[in-house]
Image: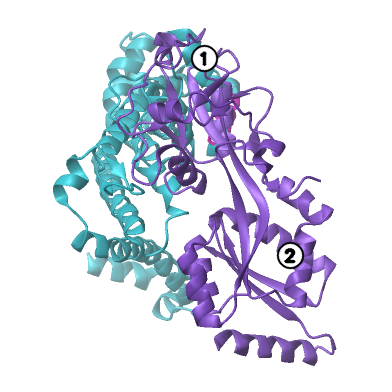
Chain colours: A cyan, B purple
């Protein structure tokens, strides 16, 4: 291998050979910058992890009670009777909202990706892509007000329930927010399937529907799953909109029509007004650590799937 | 000592800038409820008297009063009246009597959806709805109310995040100091959101400072006890204290205030000061 490269270098024009042997300064600088850019993301992640750990540490070794933290449904940091830091209800709320929003967003997003990539005309495709990307540009606090002012009364009237700020409402909002991501990553995965697959299937007499379901779906499976998992990450990390749409109530919702609460929203609502360095502040960072671990798992599995596709 | 150093430093700085006026800094600290108003006043006061600057900080009423006792502030903000023993401590420490100024009022309105036929409730009924262990979960538990458009007649409690001053004052006003609010309420992070939600939810009940009220929701009148009159939250009823969930907001000085502090405190009670009070969502201390 090395010998081959050496011959190639030797057979190259003199000017090239000189360039290879002595890198100009500008190239070194650029190389360094790119390398630094690559490393910086690792540094940032480690720094964030370190910061969260540092802030949560006194709580984890102090007031932290494993059983209470994970299995109590009572999160009551301002109690005058007994202060409790139980995250169970909040964790259940987070999972319910994430799962339900994905049940809505993944089929819708992937169907949309299939339509844009395979079925619609090129001109329509561009219009759709712009419109869907526009969904991503709406600020989350605006989604929150949509949840309170529009979807809340709609759910009350449609389903005849006492309150419209609930798990369902938050899931609808989150589904709409993660749609753009799922659609564009899903569409990329479908585009990445070689044209020859489609041509071969069509030559065998397959209809467009058969090409999509029997050829493209299996071929792009990993990429589509990665799209779905990125959507999960998006849904899990969203703060402001779910704070407003879930109703932010500490209880285990016994149906999708009951209000609940999520981990991110708890941090967003309480961190600003809790005294820095206090027990409540540290407990919120412990929640942050929990979220960090959950999203780490989601992202690693998404990454694993993407790499599986490229193999 | 540190403050004195800072003061000297600031004076030198101003002298160096060939501004011959020396700036007097008023240290103002305490209540988190009052801090927004105190800052709004301080901001405007810059334009009134450029020789005086205010350093406003929060930390809670207790912090402010402790600083007053130690003699490190000129004005302590408090959303509760100073206790007798705190007065005595201050007298012992600084040798001066504490002076009290009522600078504003804060009234909490309890409100429901306009479709709700309920017009008023007692503090006990509010505690039955919001308090830990309270049994009022449906509207028919409260004066046999039937709310049209409200599924199962269930009460949807709208509350605030637990470290909000409004939350803590509301809890104390209806439950006293030894009882929690029931978990499972919708803990919104602003008065604005509480109002918006109640406006669109027939089953809901909420509370907020009366500055946020609008005609699209119905504020309830509040009875202190079953046989007392039902009082609506207005500027007048907050001032004469007949509305049960209202409180004074105080500023305290050690001894009689210096001229600069006195001028400032008087200014906060002028028409301009009161306009700022109303804009910040509080009730002025005296009728305009």
Q: What is the chain letter for disc 1?
A: A
Say if A208 sits above or below B18 in the image. above
Q: Secondary structure at mark 1?
A: helix
Residue B24 quadrant: bottom right
Q: Position of residue A52 (x, y in %)?
A: 33, 60
* Residue shown at the point (79%, 62%) measured from the top left: B267
Say if A109 sits above or below B106 in the image. above
Along the viewing direction, whichever of B64 and B125 lies nearer the viewer? B125
Q: Position of residue A48 (x, y in %)?
A: 36, 61
Residue B125 quadrant: top left
Residue B209 quadrant: top right
* Residue shown at the point (49%, 29%) measured from the top left: B225
Q: Which residues are magenta?
A: A126-136
Q: Position of residue B109 (x, y in %)?
A: 58, 33
- Image side of residue A27 versus residue A127, left or right: left
Say if A44 sits above or below A27 in the image. above
Residue A154 marker: 1
Question: Which dot, 1 or 2, sits closer to the camera?
Answer: 2
Q: What is the chain letter for disc 2?
A: B
Whole-number angstrom distance, CA of label 1 to CA of label 2 = 50 Å
Along the viewing direction, whichever of B13 and B43 lies nearer the viewer? B43
* Residue shown at the point (60%, 58%) measured from the top left: B35
* Residues flagged by tags 1 and 2 on a common chain: no
- Image side of residue A237 versus residue A140, left or right: left
User: Does A94 appear in magenta?
Assistant: no
Residue B265 marker: 2
Q: Position of residue A133 (x, y in %)?
A: 55, 33
Along the viewing direction, whichever of A161 and B134 lies nearer the viewer? B134
Q: What is the total number of numbered labels drawn onto the structure image?
A: 2
Main SS class of the magenta portion in the image? helix
Q: Is residue A195 visible?
A: no
């Amino acid at each position: 291998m090395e010998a081959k490269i050496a011959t190639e270098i030797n057979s190259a024009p003199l000017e090239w050979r000189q360039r290879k042997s002595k890198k100009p300064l500008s190239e070194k600088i650029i190389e360094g910058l790119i390398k630094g850019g690559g490393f910086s993301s690792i540094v940032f992640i480690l720094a964030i992890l370190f910061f969260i750990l540092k802030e949560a540490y006194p709580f984890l070794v102090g007031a932290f009670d494993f059983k209470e933290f994970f299995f109590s449904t009572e999160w009551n940091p301002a109690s005058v009777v007994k202060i409790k830091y139980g995250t169970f209800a909040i964790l259940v709320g987070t999972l319910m909202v994430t799962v339900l929003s994905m049940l809505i967003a993944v089929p819708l997003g992937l169907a949309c990706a299939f339509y844009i990539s395979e079925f619609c005309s090129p001109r329509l495709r561009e219009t759709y892509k712009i419109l869907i990307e526009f969904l991503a540009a709406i600020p989350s606090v605006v989604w929150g007000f949509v949840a309170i002012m529009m979807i809340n009364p709609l759910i009350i009237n449609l389903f005849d329930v006492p309150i419209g700020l609930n798990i369902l409402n938050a899931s609808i909002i989150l589904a709409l927010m993660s749609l753009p991501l799922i659609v564009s990553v899903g569409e990329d995965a479908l585009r990445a399937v070689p044209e020859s697959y489609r041509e071969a299937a069509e030559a065998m007499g397959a209809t467009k529907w058969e090409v999509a379901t029997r050829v493209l779906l299996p071929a792009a499976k990993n990429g589509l799953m990665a799209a779905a998992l990125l959507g999960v990450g998006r849904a899990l990390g969203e703060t402001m909109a779910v704070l407003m749409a879930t109703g932010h109530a500490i209880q285990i919702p016994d149906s999708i029509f009951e209000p609940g609460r999520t981990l991110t929203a708890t941090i967003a609502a309480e961190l600003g007004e809790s005294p820095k360095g206090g027990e409540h502040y540290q407990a919120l960072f412990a929640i942050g650590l929990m979220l960090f671990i959950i999203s780490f798992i989601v992202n690693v599995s998404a990454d694993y799937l993407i790499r599986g596709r490229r193999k | 000592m540190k403050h004195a150093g800072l003061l000297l430093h600031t004076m030198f700085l101003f002298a160096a800038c060939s501004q011959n006026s020396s700036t007097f800094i008023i240290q103002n600290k305490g209540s988190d409820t009052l801090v927004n108003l105190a800052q709004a006043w301080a901001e405007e006061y810059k334009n009134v008297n450029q020789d005086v600057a205010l350093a406003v900080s929060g930390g809670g009423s207790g912090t402010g009063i402790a600083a007053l006792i130690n003699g490190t502030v000129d004005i302590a903000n408090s959303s509760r009246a100073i206790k007798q023993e705190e007065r005595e401590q201050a007298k012992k420490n600084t040798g001066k009597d504490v002076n009290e100024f009522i600078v504003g009022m804060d009234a909490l309105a309890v409100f429901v959806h306009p479709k709700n036929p309920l017009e008023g409730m007692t503090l006990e009924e509010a505690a039955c709805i919001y308090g830990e262990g309270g049994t009022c979960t449906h509207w028919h538990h409260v004066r046999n109310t039937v709310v049209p458009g409200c599924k199962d007649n269930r009460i949807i409690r709208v509350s605030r995040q637990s470290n909000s001053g409004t939350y803590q004052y509301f809890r104390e006003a209806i439950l006293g100091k030894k009882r929690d609010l029931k978990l499972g309420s919708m803990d919104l992070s602003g008065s604005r959101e509480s109002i918006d939600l109640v406006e669109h939810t027939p089953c809901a009940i909420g509370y907020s400072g009366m500055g946020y009220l609008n005609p699209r929701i119905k504020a309830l009148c509040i009875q202190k006890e079953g046989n007392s009159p039902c009082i609506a939250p207005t500027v007048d009823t907050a001032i004469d204290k007949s509305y049960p969930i209202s409180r004074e907001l105080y500023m305290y000085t050690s001894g009689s205030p210096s001229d600069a502090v006195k001028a400032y405190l008087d200014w906060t009670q002028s028409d301009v000061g009161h306009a700022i009070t109303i804009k910040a969502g509080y009730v002025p201390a005296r009728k305009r």
